[in-house]
C-alpha cells in the first residue's frame, strides 16, 4: 500500500470536469485508488463517490493506492491534484 498526502491546487474549480478527469486517470491503473478527506474514504474510480468529497483548492487529502502499479498510480494522482500535470481531455 502507498499513501501520499497532497494539497489540492487545480487551476479550475473542482466541479464536474476536473473530478471526471481525476476518475478517468485513476481508472487507467489496475491498483485500487482511494482518496481520504475529512474522515471519508472514497474510491477514486467512482465519479459519484468523488463528488461527495466536495474538494476545494487548499484541501489536504491522502491518496491511498494498492496493487501492482500502486506507486505509479499514487504519483500520477498526486501530481494531478497538486496542479503539476494537466489530464488529457
Image (cartoon, helix red, strand yellow):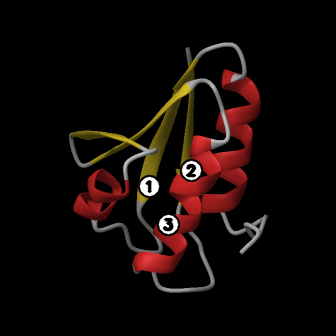
* Residue in the image at 59% along x and 24% along y: 31
Secondary structure found at label 2 = strand
- Which quarter of the rendered picture does the N terminus lie within? top right
* Residue in the image at 28% along x and 68% along y: 54
Cα distance in 3D space between marks 2 and 1: 6 Å
Cα distance in 3D space between marks 2 and 3: 19 Å
* Residue in the image at 78% along x and 64% along y: 85
- The answer to the question of whether label 3 and label 1 lie on touching residues, with beta carbons closer than 8 A, is no
Q: Position of residue 52 (x, y in %)?
A: 22, 60
Mark closest to the chain's N terminus, 2 or 1:
2
Which of pointers 3 and 1 indicates the residue nearer the eye? Answer: 3
Mark closest to the chain's N terminus, 3 or 1:
3
Instruction: Name above or below for residue 41 compared with residue 32.
Output: below
- The answer to the question of whether label 2 and label 3 lie on touching residues, with beta carbons closer than 8 A, is no
Which of pointers 2 and 3 indicates the residue nearer the eye? Answer: 3
Secondary structure found at label 1 = strand
Within 10 Å of disc 2 (Cα), the crowding (few <14, some 14-19, many 20+) is: some
* Residue highlighted by disc 2: 6
Mark closest to the chain's N terminus, 2 or 3:
2
Q: Position of residue 84 (x, y in %)?
A: 78, 65
Cα distance in 3D space between marks 3 and 1: 19 Å
* Residue highlighted by disc 3: 20
- The answer to the question of whether label 2 and label 1 lie on touching residues, with beta carbons closer than 8 A, is yes
Q: Position of residue 64 (x, y in %)?
A: 49, 30
* Residue highlighted by disc 1: 60
Amino acid at each position: 500500500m502507498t499513501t501520499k498526502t497532497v494539497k489540492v491546487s487545480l487551476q479550475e474549480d473542482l466541479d464536474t470536469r476536473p473530478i471526471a478527469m481525476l476518475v478517468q486517470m485513476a481508472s487507467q491503473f489496475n491498483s485500487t485508488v482511494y482518496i481520504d478527506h475529512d474522515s471519508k474514504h472514497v474510491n477514486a474510480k467512482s465519479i459519484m463517490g468523488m463528488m461527495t468529497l466536495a474538494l476545494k483548492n487548499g484541501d489536504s487529502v491522502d491518496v491511498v493506492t494498492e496493487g501492482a502499479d500502486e506507486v505509479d498510480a499514487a504519483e500520477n494522482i498526486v501530481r494531478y491534484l497538486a496542479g503539476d500535470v494537466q489530464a488529457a481531455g
